[in-house]
C-alpha cells in the first residue's frame, strides 16, 4: 500500500466518522433543546424544528462530499499529506460555520423567561459517591505509558530509516502523535466525569438523582474503555505503518482491521445502549411534571456560548451536562477546567511543532 493510499484511507475514515457524528448529534439531546439552545419542550414536534433538522442533514452530507473531493484532488496532484490536512480542515471549519448558522436560527425560538425557569427548576447537589474512578485512573495510566512508548518507538524507527528512501516524517509520526494526545485526554475526561455536576429537576425528586448517578457512572466507564480501545487501535496502526515502510509487511493486517471494527461496534453499541436505556443525562429514567418539565433544569441560555461552552465563575463544577451530544462538558468559568484546556493546547502545539520540525530537517 502506497503512502498516498494510507493517507487517503485515514481521510476517508475520518470524514465518515466525523460526518456521521454530525448527522446524529442534534438528535442526541433532551427534548426542548435545539442546536444547544433551550427553546422549550413544546417545540419538539413542530414543523419549524423539523425544517431546521432537515437543513442540517443536507448541509452535513454536502460538506462531507466537499471535504473528500478537496482531499482526494490535492492527493492526486501529488500532495497526499496536504490533501489529508486540507480535507480535514474543510470538514471541521465547514461544520463550525454550518452549526453557527443553525444555532442562531434556533436562538430566535428561545423563550425570554428561560433564565427564570432554570432557577425555579434546578437545585445543585454535591458530587455524591462517584463510581468508576478506579477504571478511569487505570485507563489514564495505561494510555499515557503506551502512547509515550509508541511515540518513542516511531521516533527511533524514523532515525533508523536514514539509509532508505524514507517517507515523510508526518506519515510516520501522525498516528503516534494523535495517540499521545487523544487516548490520555479521553481517559482524563472519564476521570472528571466521575465527579460531574448533578441537579434535581423539579417534579422528579429522588428519581432524578438516581437516574443521573447511573448515567454518570455509565459514561465514565464508557469513556475509560473508549480510551483503552483507541490507544490499542492507534498502537497497532503505528506499528503496522512503520513495518510497511520497512518492507516487513505489505498491509495493515487483519488484526488492525479487526481492532478498528471492535472500536466501531463498541462505540455504536454503547451509544445505542445509553440513548435507549438512559437518554442524555439519564432523562429516560427521570420523571417530570407539567409545571416543571425535565428540560427546565437546563433552561438558562445565559451561561452558554454558542450552546457549546458553559461559562459560570460562580459554579464550582468542573463538568456539567451537555446541551446536546452524550455526557458532560467543561465549565470554562472554572480555573481547573481552564488549566486542563491550556495544558492540552500546549501539548498539541508542542507535538505539532515537533512533527513540523521533523519535516524540515
Image: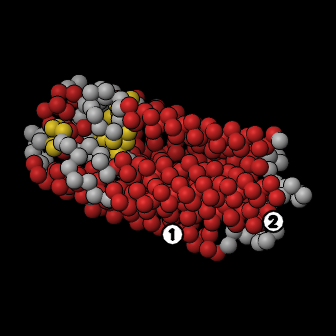
- Which quadrant of the structure image shows residue 109? top left
- Which quadrant of the structure image shows residue 307? top left
Of helix, strand and loop, which one carries label 2? loop
Residue 21 is labelled as none
* In-image side of 74 versus 344 (left or right): right
- The residue located at (62%, 37%) in the rendering is 349
- Quadrant in which the N terminus is drawn: bottom right
Q: Relative to residue 334, is residue 282 depicted above or below? A: below
Q: How is the image coloured?
A: secondary structure
Q: Position of residue 265 (x, y in %)?
A: 47, 67
* In-image side of 69 versus 233 (left or right): right
- Quadrant in which the C terminus is drawn: top right
Classify 10 Å Cα crowding around label 2: few (below 14), some (14-19), many (20 and above). some
Does any portion of residue 222 appear in the rendered image? no
Q: Position of residue 88 (x, y in %)?
A: 63, 44
Of helix, strand and loop, which one carries label 1? helix
Near-viewer residue (343 or 38): 343
The residue that mark 1 highlights is: 262
Q: Residue furthest bottom?
A: 254
Q: Position of residue 246 (x, y in %)?
A: 81, 65
- The residue located at (9%, 39%) in the rendering is 291
Q: Relative to residue 357, is residue 287 depicted above or below? A: below
Distance from disc 1 to disc 2, alpha carbons, whole Å, reads 27 Å
**Mark 2 or mark 1, which is nearer the start of the sequence?**
2
Q: For the image shown, how many numbered marks are present on the structure?
A: 2
**Callout in the foreground (1, 2):** 2
The residue that mark 2 highlights is: 246
Q: Position of residue 32 (x, y in %)?
A: 26, 41
- The residue located at (22%, 53%) in the rendering is 129
Amino acid at each position: 500500500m502506497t503512502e498516498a493510499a494510507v493517507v487517503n484511507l485515514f481521510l476517508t475514515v475520518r470524514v465518515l466518522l466525523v460526518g456521521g457524528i454530525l448527522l446524529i448529534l442534534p438528535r442526541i439531546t433532551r427534548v426542548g433543546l435545539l442546536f444547544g439552545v433551550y427553546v422549550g419542550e413544546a417545540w419538539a414536534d413542530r414543523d419549524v424544528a423539523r425544517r431546521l433538522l432537515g437543513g442540517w442533514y443536507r448541509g452535513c452530507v454536502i460538506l462531507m462530499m466537499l471535504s473528500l473531493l478537496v482531499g482526494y484532488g490535492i492527493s492526486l496532484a501529488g500532495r497526499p499529506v496536504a490533501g489529508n490536512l486540507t480535507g480535514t480542515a474543510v470538514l471541521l471549519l465547514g461544520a463550525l460555520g454550518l452549526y453557527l448558522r443553525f444555532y442562531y436560527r434556533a436562538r430566535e425560538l428561545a423563550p425570554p423567561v428561560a433564565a427564570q425557569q432554570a432557577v425555579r427548576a434546578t437545585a445543585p447537589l454535591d458530587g455524591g459517591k462517584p463510581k468508576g474512578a478506579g477504571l478511569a485512573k487505570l485507563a489514564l495510566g495505561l494510555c499515557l505509558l503506551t502512547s509515550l512508548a509508541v511515540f518513542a518507538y516511531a521516533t527511533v524507527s524514523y532515525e533508523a530509516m536514514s539509509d532508505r528512501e524514507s517517507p515523510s516524517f508526518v506519515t510516520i509520526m501522525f498516528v503516534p502523535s494523535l495517540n499521545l494526545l487523544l487516548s490520555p485526554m479521553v481517559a482524563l475526561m472519564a476521570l472528571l466525569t466521575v465527579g460531574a455536576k448533578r441537579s434535581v429537576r423539579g417534579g422528579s425528586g429522588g428519581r432524578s438523582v438516581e437516574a443521573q448517578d447511573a448515567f454518570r457512572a455509565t459514561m465514565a466507564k464508557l469513556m475509560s474503555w473508549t480510551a483503552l480501545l483507541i490507544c490499542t487501535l492507534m498502537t497497532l496502526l503505528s506499528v503496522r505503518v512503520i513495518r510497511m515502510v520497512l518492507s516487513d509487511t505489505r498491509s495493515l493486517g487483519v488484526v488492525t482491521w479487526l481492532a478498528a471494527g471492535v472500536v466501531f461496534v463498541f462505540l455504536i453499541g454503547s451509544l445505542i445502549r445509553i440513548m435507549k436505556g438512559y437518554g442524555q443525562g439519564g432523562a429516560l429514567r427521570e420523571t417530570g411534571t407539567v409545571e416543571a418539565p425535565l428540560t427546565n433544569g437546563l433552561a438558562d441560555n445565559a451561561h452558554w456560548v454558542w450552546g457549546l461552552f458553559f461559562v459560570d465563575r460562580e459554579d464550582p463544577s468542573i463538568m456539567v451536562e451537555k446541551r446536546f451530544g452524550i455526557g458532560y462538558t467543561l465549565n470554562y468559568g472554572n480555573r481547573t477546567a481552564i488549566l486542563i484546556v491550556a495544558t492540552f493546547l500546549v501539548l498539541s502545539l508542542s507535538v505539532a511543532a515537533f512533527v513540523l520540525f521533523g519535516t524540515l530537517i
